[in-house]
Amino acid sequence: MEYGILSGLFLLCCVLATHNGLAMAEEGLCSSAFNYRDALGKAILFFEGQRSGNLPANQRVKWRGDSALSDGKAENVNLIGGYYDAGDNVKFVWPMAFTVSLLSWTAIEYKKEISSVNQLGYLRTAIRWGTNFILKAHSSPTMLYTQVGDGNSDHQCWERPEDMDTSRTLYKITSKSPGTEAAAEAAAALSAASIVFKGIDSNYSRSLLNQSRTLFEFADKYRGSYQASCPFYCSYSGYQDELLWAAAWLYKASGESRYLSYVSSNQGWSQAVSEFSWDNKFVGAQTLLAKEFYGGKKDLTKFKSDAETFICAVMPGSSSVQIRATPGGLMFVRDSSNLQYVTSSSMVLFIYSQTLNEAHINGVQCGSVHFSAFQIRNFAKSQVDYILGNNPMKMSYMMGFGSKYPMQLHHRGSSIPSIKVHPAKVGCNDGMTNYFSSSKPNPNTHVGAIVGGPDTNDHFNDVRSDYSHAEPTTYMNAAFVGSVAALLAESKEECLQLPQINRTADMVNSV
């Protein structure tokens, strides 16, 4: 279709929207300035750069190599694989499982849209890389390995995963030393993933669901809060949120009434919250169960009510808003990897707005203010667009997307020349002196990585040592995958495939 015809369709679209009383600049119809397909592909590609273990022949991130090939050996268990958590070389199973849960949720909610842009296979591969590791880590019915690597020694060292010589200490939970949050999150991840693979690998799907059931039983029977890997991932919200989250996913995956009865009888645990994170899963469970409520299960009222309280807490203009915004319009929860809360909240808002539309509900009432499903969705869209470049700094907070993005990502492998380019070992201290402290851009662009983000005044200081703003995490990216996937239909249909303003290089060529 020629550009002249597209321009005419664009004008018609805008006229119709204006006729309906929607201000284009505010509502966002036909105004996609970003290539969401490209952003999705890069956000998924990021996970290949976080892989631990033996890399496959079709690995697209070429600056990475095999690493941590003896993980688990100290206890005669195979813990090779999985994902490095962030810019370090430690594998934390609790947030890794949350990452898998989010990626699986995305694959379920937006299967058709993601497939239409040829990314579903890559997304499933990213999920399987995580679930394969969780299956290994669940080495017996009442045991789950929850961490590989010593966080303290690792964080004092700056070296590529391929050169890693710090301790690969193993941490685990058992019936005598429980960690309900970690076991329940692993159960949620496996049950959600079992839905993803149900139609394409039935044996694998069945295995995931069976392991999920066992993990949930372990988590619920041996209750105890997870403190094994403090000070890096401590549980602050308790374990009731993870138990509800896991049971909700098990019901969705299995259809077994016992899991529905579990969440229904434990409705009193549900809390109204204003964040969705690796630690606090309440609104995730509430969003899943609100869909069941609108589907006819009216005994789940509290979950629906609490989910809508979350929406009222984050929506600008709400009479009960709890989350402030930066002058540039970015949600600001706390000044430490703030974009993790932005991406996770946006993902929930997109899914909830879709749930409202499917149930033919006209929106959410927040005191004296009413928000339509469209307004909820459009606020979430504004957060995605901020991350991709519509912000006061006029920069993308995704590596490799757009013409301006951070150059000093706080990430060991990205900041040191690839082992394929520089085969000589880079030791811990050499890495700290020559690369961590360097003012030069990272030699490897970790395409798709989302950084922690700007401060409360929309300012971003591109300095490698500033980990709270310059470090990526797997769960931050996973939630962004879910957020940007929701916009694929807009860029493909609502905006009639208009030429994209922010075209970037082909994903594979950018690696």
Image (cartoon, grey):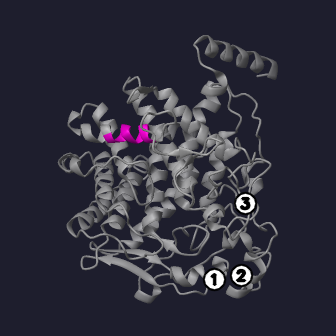
Foreground disc of the pair 2, 3: 3
Report the front residue among 287 and 127: 287
Foreground disc of the pair 1, 3: 3
**How would you classify the magenta stretch by its main secondary structure?**
helix
Q: How many marks?
A: 3
Q: Which residues are magenta?
A: 306-313
* Rendered position, 184 above or below 164: above
Q: Disc 1 designates what residue?
A: 157
User: Distance between the Cα atoms at labels 2 and 3?
Assistant: 20 Å
**Upstream in the sequence, badge 2 or badge 1?**
1
Q: What label sits on residue 467 in the rendered view?
A: none
Q: Horizontal and vertical percent for residue 397?
A: 68, 52
Badges 2 and 1: C-beta atoms under 8 Å apart? yes
Judge left or right: residue 418 versus residue 171: right
Q: What label sits on residue 432 in the rendered view?
A: 2
The secondary structure type at the circle numbered 1 is loop
Q: Horizontal and vertical percent for residue 123?
A: 55, 51
Q: What label sits on residue 461 in the rendered view?
A: 3
